[in-house]
Amino acid sequence: MCCCRNSSQPCEERTVAVWWTFRAPSIGHCCRLEDSKGVSSLAERQNKASVSSPRPAITFGTDGWRGVIAEDFTEENVRKVAHAIARYVVRAEKPGSGVLVGYDTRFASERFAHVAAQAVAATSTPVWLAREACPTPALSLLVRQRGAAAGIQITASHNPYRWNGVKLKASYGSSASPAIVAQVELELSRVLRDGVPMLPPRHDLVQAIDVRTPYLEALSGLVNWDKLRAFKPRFLIDPMHGAGRGLLLELFRRHGVAAREIRGDRDPLFGGVNPEPIEPHIEATRQGMLEGDEDAGFAFDGDADRIGAIDRDGTFITPHQIFSILLWHLAGTRKLAGDVVKSFSTTKMIDKIAAKFGRQIWETPIGFKYVCDRMLESEVLIGGEESGGIATRLHVPERDATVSALLLAEVMAWHGRRLGELVSMLHREFGEHHYGRVDLMLRDGQKEKAIERFSDRSFDSLLDWPIVRRENLDGVKVYLGDIGWVMVRASGTEPLLRVYAETIRAETTARILAEVASSVRRL
């Protein structure tokens, strides 16, 4: 669940946050613009919204369950979710293989992890509990390496500090498939109906485990360190006070690559911003780049599975651009085999790069569990989504910010170019792609009317462009002549509508987003 979905206010009373790419002197740049109406800080608005709206008891979203700490995210509810997962493991997996439990740096995450571990152990299932905070992809890797039945990570990823959550990782080392999630939801419904039985504690079945060391060892073999050292780069690392702190820094230092880290201490308030590596939350990364002499800056979200990047001149490199760079490098430079998976809301530049290298494109609904599902079924080189979660066949089928950062560093070293120069090169070869998104908090019924309008064949033009094609894989996407597309997608649990657009000009993308937002408000 996205952190900005929780408000009972109609959209006219709330600031609408917009981000899109516009053309800078050398490269596309991602900007978040905010109306001056209402509270000035987006993070503050989201945090206030999270405590002003009624919350469902426990609902699994695209990546587990999340809730507001001390409201619905309580020890009692964590125990219920963990017991439901344990019921699934006992019935559908090999419970003797055990369950791994990890946690991030949020408030009381280690305490919630202990509660989850004890709840699973009470079902006579062995549990290995992380000794310290760890990235979600590190836990996923260890689940796969050890052949564990499942993994439970206590994290709310990029959500505001008031939130925490439970991510479920399957035995193959990634997001639980839709089929697995459905089974866990069925078990959870029974637990919510009947309660957690009074089982005797099994402290003897809970053992501590080092998650970070095997993760560092696995990542050391992913890139060409000789090329990196020869390039003599300097990198800035910003874990945003999250679970990725210290890891990429340690890898670079082990292999003789210069780097420094900012925001590497534990701060459950995340410095007053959301731990999400997009603007405006990575302004500290940008300032660090402008004040230092590094060649690139890498920022990770709270559990280090999503990445953002800053070029040497302070330009934000969007998740779409990162995905494009990595595909171009892995398929074109390293000539690795495999298809490409992308979520429905991701840039069309991916399609053009894949076509150049003869790779099949698989498009999925939004949510990394769908990307992972396809990676398990097909021979896939790389899969990614709009939010900065990217996975490759070089590693487990799991999005991983540290892996993405290592590969970006390798691309720079291999080609002797800055990130901005690489994006400019892609624009010259494949055309400019300027992406944007607006999130609208609406009155009851408005999002349904918006979906109905976009689906209606009589809606055949938008501003200056005819609608030439529609797709409805997840939401409704309409193609506007030969300039690009715009898409609307409704939240299933909140009065929220996401509007996405991508065109060949930044000002066109901005104009389309503004027009759609305005027209939706009038519905």
Image: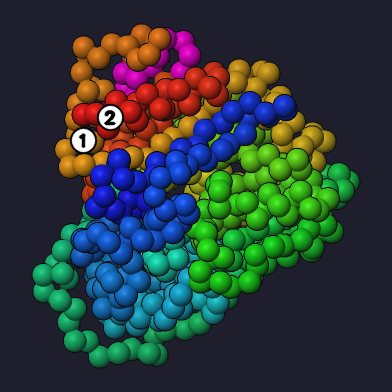
Residue at numbered disc 1: 446
Residue 6 lies, in percent from the top left, at: 30, 54
**Magenta-colored stretch includes residue 266:** no
**354, 10: nearer the viewer:** 10
Q: Position of residue 500 (x, y in %)?
A: 41, 31
What residue is disc 2 on?
A: 520
| Residue type of the residue flagged with mark 2 | Val
> Label 2 neighbourhood size at 10 Å, few (<14), some (14-19), many (20+)?
some
Instruction: Report the residue that reaches farthest toward the left.
Output: 193
Residue at image coords 32%, 11%: 461
Give the alpha-carbon distance from disc 2 to disc 1, as whole Å: 7 Å
Please indicate, yes or no, whether residue 283 appears anywhere in the rendered image. yes
Amino acid type of the residue that numbered disc 1 sits on in the rendered structure: Gln
Q: Residue at horizontal 78%, vertical 58%?
A: 259
Name the residue nearer the viewer: 488 or 15: 15
Q: On the rendered structure, is 173 left or right of 287? A: left
Residue range in magenta is 470-484
